[in-house]
Amino acid sequence: MIELRDVTLAYGDHVVLDRVSFKAEFHERVAILGSSGEGKTTILRLILGLLRPDSGKILIDGQDITEHSESQLRDFRMNFSIVFQEGALFDSMNVRENVAFCMREYTNYSEDEIEKRVRSLLNRLGIEDAIYLMPEELSGGMQRRVAIARSLAGCEPKMMLYDEPTSGLDPLTADNICKLIKELSKGDPPGRAGFIIVTHKVTDASKVAERFMYLRNGNIIFDGDINALKNTSDTELRSFISELYAA
């Protein structure tokens, strides 16, 4: 389980998160919604220990990680795989080397094992034919698929973390990425791997998530399922999710 307990974080005078609290099981499918600059990505970085809060606690399986050293955090990070916004692939490496990178860094796999796992992951995501292509030769959708393959390469995560995974993609490609996100979280709880997706694209979130949070002014002002989201009485939130009413 993930728990944020009264977490506050500010950059100078700008308070990004103000005593934010929530719990999420690893098998949950969660979407964190909000406008740009509201702290959505900050929450992912806090969960991974890439940022430390000014106050409050972040607990992973009941253990507070806020004061952990980098070496201690490594074990906790193995619970998660993250796909950063825009994919963040290494421009100087082809697809094969991008996916193999984490295995060389964080596992004891032999080169033969790495080769088999790279090909297996690329096949699973439908992009094995792109194995020797460079990132600049890939479409936006293929770049996201490679980024997802790379995120899965070094571990078997309990939960995936997605930072704006459909941002900048055309509707058809975004829909395919949503289908992939659901496919990677198939099965029934508690055995399945869940995810937290942060996005401002409400329609995409509605295709994959079962629980929705909405961040505004450093606070979670909504936490519920799709029916509760559509029936919210909050005027600003209704405006934010207006595309759902047209769907």
Image (cartoon, helix red, strand yellow):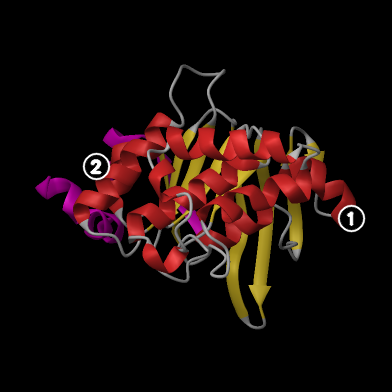
Residue 238 image offset from top left, x and y in percent: 24, 54
Residue depicted at 56% across the width and 18% down the height: 190
On the rendered structure, is 182 left or right of 26? left
The label on residue 218 is none
Residue 195 image offset from top left, x and y in percent: 51, 38
Q: Is residue 190 above or below residue 174?
A: above
Residue depicted at 62% across the width and 32% down the height: 158
Return the residue nearer the eye: 244 or 151: 151
Return the residue nearer the eye: 185 or 93: 93
Residue 147 is one of the magenta-drawn residues? no
Residue depicted at 47% across the width and 49% down the height: 131
Residue depicted at 38% across the width and 65% down the height: 137
In three-dimensional space, the C-alpha distance between marks 1 and 2, rounded to whole angstroms, equals 42 Å
Q: Nearer the viewer, mark 1 or mark 2?
A: 1
**Which residue lies under the disc numbered 2?**
230
Which sits earlier in the primary sequence, circle 1 or circle 2? 1
Residue type marked 1: Ser
Mark 2: give few (<14), some (14-19) or many (20+) Cα within 10 Å: some
Return the residue nearer the eye: 76 or 93: 93
**Which residue lies under the disc numbered 1?**
69
Mark 1: give few (<14), some (14-19) or many (20+) Cα within 10 Å: few
Q: Is residue 209 visible?
A: no
Q: Which residues are magenta?
A: 219-247
Q: Is residue 71 visible?
A: yes
Q: Secondary structure at mark 1?
A: loop
